[in-house]
Image (cartoon, helix red, strand yellow):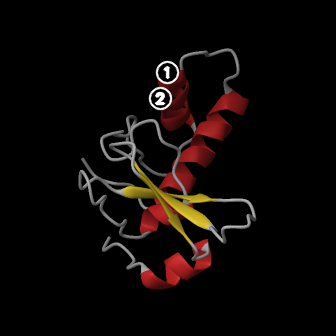
């Protein structure tokens, strides 16, 4: 399945929002989107989006970067910003597949400078 770019994802979310305002009585989101596509769509959009890559995890700005693999299981690590603390930990890398959590003194901006942007 094709992965949506950030622009395509934003476009899709906008279309879903417009469909909700235009067809508030249609409770099934798939039917609502089909109606919107048939009547108002300015361009063709797929009805279903695969959750194969992200599952039920909300998309973030960090999704455009290559993620660091977990040292235990190899799954992608997620970033969590930590409130100011006496240990100097600014972010945590949290594994999406196991319970590993690594503390880091780097800020999120510091990590972004080191990460590679994904090839689209």
Q: Residue at x 30, y 74 (%)?
A: 119
Q: Under tag 1, what secondary structure?
A: helix
Specify the quadrant that holds the C terminus.
bottom left
Q: Is the C-beta separation of discs 1 and 2 under 8 Å?
A: yes
- Graded by Cα atoms within 10 Å as few (under 14), some (14 to 19) or many (20 or more), the crowding at tag 1 reads some
Residue 91 lies, in percent from the top left, at 59, 65
Residue beneath disc 2: 34
Depth order, front residue of 74/62: 74
Is residue 101 shown above or below 15? below
Using the image, tell me which numbered label, if any, was put on residue 31. 1
User: Quadrant of the rendered structure where residue 16 is?
Assistant: top right
The answer to whether residue 7 is visible is no
Is residue 35 shown above or below 43? above
Q: Residue at x 42, y 70 (%)?
A: 65
The answer to whether residue 92 is visible is yes
Q: Is residue 1 left or right of residue 32?
A: left
Residue 101 lies, in percent from the top left, at 45, 53
Q: Under tag 2, what secondary structure?
A: helix
Residue 75 lies, in percent from the top left, at 28, 52
- Graded by Cα atoms within 10 Å as few (under 14), some (14 to 19) or many (20 or more), the crowding at tag 2 reads some
Is residue 87 shown above or below 26? below
Disc tally is 2
């Amino acid at each position: 399945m094709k992965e949506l770019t950030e622009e395509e994802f934003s476009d899709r979310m906008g279309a879903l929002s417009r469909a909700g305002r235009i067809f508030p009585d249609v409770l099934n989101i798939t039917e609502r989107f089909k109606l919107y596509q048939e009547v108002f769509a300015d361009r063709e959009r797929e009805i279903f989006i695969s959750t194969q890559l992200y599952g039920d995890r909300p998309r973030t700005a960090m999704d455009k970067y290559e993620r660091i693999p977990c040292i235990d299981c190899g799954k992608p690590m997620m970033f969590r910003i930590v409130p100011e603390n006496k240990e100097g930990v600014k972010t945590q890398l949290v594994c999406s597949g196991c319970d590993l959590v690594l503390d880091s003194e780097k800020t999120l901006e510091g990590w972004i400078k080191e990460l590679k942007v994904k090839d689209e």
